[in-house]
Amino acid sequence: MDQKAARTAATKAFKAGGMPLRKGHHRLGDPKSDDIVWYIDLRAQGAGPTAPLRFEIGCWVAALGHPEPEGGPVDCPLLLDRPVAATSPAEIGEEVGDLVTLVRRPSTPAAALREALADGALGRPLVDQSLRTFLDG
């Protein structure tokens, strides 16, 4: 699938799902008022216009006291990569819709995030020690 068409379709779907671009990243929530904020970027897995795409997903938790992630998902205490399965712009729109639904689930409180991690709904993300300690406490 053409990356430009995929990115255009993904951006439209993120915006329709309530995750418009903010500071260059699709963001669900507001770090000034929400307990949990999700960041999602669409990244190429290699060079060239036909390189496979993946979603880079990050979760920022206000209670940890970390600064707002300037670099988007990669600066979050929870980081997850998901390959894009879609093969057409229409399919990527559906895939983004499913992804937005997934990250809306554990929006608040932290117990919902703990549950989503425990039941595998988020796959196998990288979770830093500060978030692990917070969720276990």
Image (tube, helix red, strand yellow):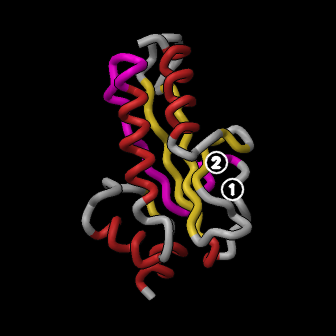
Q: Which mark is residue 69?
A: 1
- Contact between labelled residues 1 and 2, with CB atoms less than 8 Å apart: yes
Residue at which label 2 appears: 72
Q: Residue furthest front?
A: 16
Q: Could you tell me residue 82's position as x and y percent?
A: 38, 40
Tag 1: amino acid: Pro
**Vertical arrangement, residue 39 with respect to residue 41, above or below:** below
Q: What residue is drawn where x is 31% and y is 54%? A: 123
Quarter the N terminus occupies: top left
Determine whether the residue tagged by mark 1 lies in a helix, strand or loop: loop
**Vertical arrangement, residue 16 with respect to residue 70, above or below:** above
Say which quarter of the image contains residue 23.
top right
**Vertical arrangement, residue 34 with respect to residue 37, above or below:** below
Q: What residue is drawn where x is 37% and y is 34%? A: 95
Q: Which mark is residue 117?
A: none
Query: Start and end of the magenta stretch?
Result: 71-91
Quarter the C terminus occupies: bottom left
Is residue 72 in the magenta section?
yes
Between 93 and 120, the one lying in front of the other is 93
Is residue 94 in the magenta section?
no
Q: Callout 2 environment at 10 Å: few (<14), some (14 to 19), or many (20+)?
A: many
Q: Could you tell me residue 74's position as x and y percent?
A: 58, 49
